């Protein structure tokens, strides 16, 4: 909270608030990108999924998250960074026009409500484990803390706190992993005692199994490419080279340290089989509370809170930027000055926090909340962005059909028992909409020179 107040001195306009004035050096940029998803789903959600399904159950995260960062650095960074725009909604508008930009922005915002809700649930669980307060009270306290420093300092506050929190995360996870390994008598003892299937990375040679496997990679790997939280962190880097290096470093860090919670959870299950919980997402916190000393508890819960808060803060800022820049600003046209835009951004941060808190009260499964958020972006926005950058025949109508057909297919096909994951089927429909719409209604677009 103090960082939020301190960094507010650098906030003069919307660009400072959303993109930190595009001045972040490598160490701040890389840590901010690493912290993008390293929160509740990695530490709580993925660890419980791993214990239930093995390595193949966590392809979505952390493997899919690392894939997204790599793909963005290789294929999307160069054309997008050089546009020098405030939001991802502006990118859709520049490529396809204002109507597509507005539609993309409207479809982008709801995904963040569930995403931020997942982080608030995790923060509430941690506070409850430490202090005994209810989940609802923990959610309210957590949302206020993260809201305050995001409201005050925007991306500057997020980037600075991300750097500090990254250090705490790394130290904390290594410390707890060493503790678990020593308790078990060494790394190999844990590996040898692991249940069958714990390290299976590829599915059985069956079409349905491979479709679900590819679908798991796609949820974060492709679905988070058209997301404002990735965009704002990439665009905050001081130049294109720093942005690219940050993406590759963050991908390596994310995959490496994303495996630590899985190892710790496996060790906890083997060492303390009596540690049965109604909520398996609480395995790691309960293990540390019951079997760790005070120093371990301080380090672990410090790392846990740091990881989740860094993810939550950018999740609040991303939809607030989209709402302000791409939905509110066009309505008022040039009647909003920089000071008014800045206050609109801050008020929308508050609005997003309130809605996300209500979502958190409604549904408390972290892994599902995050997956659903990414799938909404995948089925509606991935194809238009990719086609707009790399297919010079993509048209405005094709983009609109792709957005609407993909989302409609995802909502309707969810009622049927398909042999293919619903989000892959909807992604296919989105691509078909792009091809048919662009073929039937070709238009000259600004993206010709970009392609």
Image: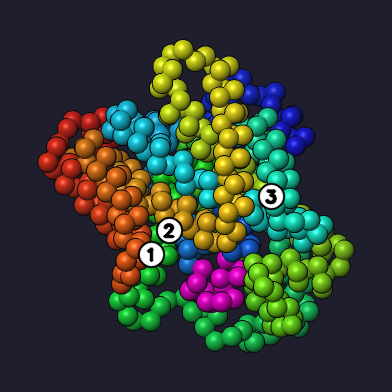
SS for callout 2 = helix
Q: Choose between 79 and 329: the one closer to the eye.
A: 329
What is the quadrant of the N terminus in the image? top right
Q: In the picture shown, does residue 301 fall above or below 377? A: below
Label 2–label 1 contact, CB within 8 A: yes
Q: CA distance from mark 2 to mark 1?
A: 6 Å
Q: Residue at x 30, y 30 (%)?
A: 99
Residue 262 percent location from the top left of the image: 62, 70
Q: Position of residue 298 (x, y in %)?
A: 82, 58
Q: In this view of the protein, can residue 164 be seen by the observer?
A: no
Residue bearing mark 3 = 139
| Near-viewer residue (97 or 85) | 97
Q: Is residue 96 magenta?
A: no
Element type at mark 3: helix
Query: Few, some or many C-alpha atoms within 10 Å of disc 2 (few <14, some 14-19, many ≥20)?
Result: many
- In the image, taking residue 398 as reference, residue 208 lies left or right, namely right
Between residue 344 and residue 41, name the one nearer to us: 344
Q: Could one spot residue 200 in this view of the protein?
A: yes
Magenta-colored span: 46-58
Residue 341, relative to residue 425: is it above or below?
Answer: above
Which callout, 2 or 3, points to the residue nearer the camera? 3
Residue holding disc 2:
219
According to the picture, the residue beneath numbered tag 1 turns out to be 215
Name the front one of labels 3 and 1.
Answer: 3
Mark 1 and mark 3 in contact (Cβ < 8 Å)?
no
- Residue in the image at 66% along x and 24% along y: 10
Q: Position of residue 443 (x, y in %)?
A: 17, 32
């Amino acid at each position: 909270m103090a960082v939020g107040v301190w960094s507010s001195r650098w906030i003069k306009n919307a660009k400072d608030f959303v993109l930190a004035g595009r001045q972040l050096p490598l160490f701040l940029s890389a840590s901010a990108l690493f912290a993008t998803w390293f929160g509740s789903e990695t530490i709580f959600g993925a660890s419980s999924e791993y214990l239930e399904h093995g390595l193949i159950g966590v392809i979505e995260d952390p493997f899919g998250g690392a894939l997204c960062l790599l793909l963005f650095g290789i294929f999307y960074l160069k054309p997008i960074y050089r546009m020098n725009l405030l939001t991802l909604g502006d990118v859709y508008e520049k490529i396809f026009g204002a109507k597509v930009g507005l539609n993309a922005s409207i479809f982008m915002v709801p995904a963040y409500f569930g995403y931020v809700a997942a982080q608030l649930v995790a923060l509430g669980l941690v506070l409850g484990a430490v202090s005994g307060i209810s989940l609802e009270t923990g959610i309210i306290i957590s949302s206020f803390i993260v809201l305050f420093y995001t409201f005050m300092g925007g991306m500057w506050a997020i980037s600075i706190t991300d750097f500090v929190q990254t250090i705490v995360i790394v130290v904390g996870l290594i410390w707890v992993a060493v503790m678990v390994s020593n308790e078990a008598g060494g790394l190999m003892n844990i590996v040898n005692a692991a249940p069958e299937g714990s390290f299976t990375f590829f599915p059985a040679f069956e079409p349905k199994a491979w479709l679900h496997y590819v679908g798991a990679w796609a949820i974060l790997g492709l679905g988070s490419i058209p997301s404002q939280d990735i965009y704002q962190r990439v665009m905050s880097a001081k130049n294109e080279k720093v942005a690219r290096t940050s993406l590759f470093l963050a991908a390596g860090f994310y995959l490496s340290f994303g495996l630590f919670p899985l190892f710790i959870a496996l060790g906890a299950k083997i060492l303390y089989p009596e540690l049965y919980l109604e909520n398996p997402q609480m395995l790691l916190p309960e293990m540390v509370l019951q079997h760790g000393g005070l120093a371990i508890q301080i380090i672990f819960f410090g790392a846990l809170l740091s990881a989740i808060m860094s993810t939550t803060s950018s999740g609040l800022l991303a939809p607030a930027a989209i709402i302000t820049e791409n939905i509110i600003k066009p309505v008022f046209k040039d009647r909003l000055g920089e000071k008014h835009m800045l206050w609109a951004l801050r008020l929308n941060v508050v609005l997003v926090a309130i809605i996300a808190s209500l979502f958190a009260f409604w549904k408390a499964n972290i892994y599902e909340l995050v997956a659903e958020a990414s799938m909404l972006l995948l089925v509606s926005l991935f194809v238009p962005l990719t086609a707009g950058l790399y297919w010079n025949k993509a048209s405005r109508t094709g983009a609109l059909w792709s957005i609407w057909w993909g989302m409609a297919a995802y909502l309707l096909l969810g009622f049927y028992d398909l042999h293919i994951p619903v989000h892959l089927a909807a992604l296919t429909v989105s691509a078909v909409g792009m091809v048919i719409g662009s073929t039937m209604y070709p238009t000259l677009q600004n993206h010709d020179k970009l392609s």
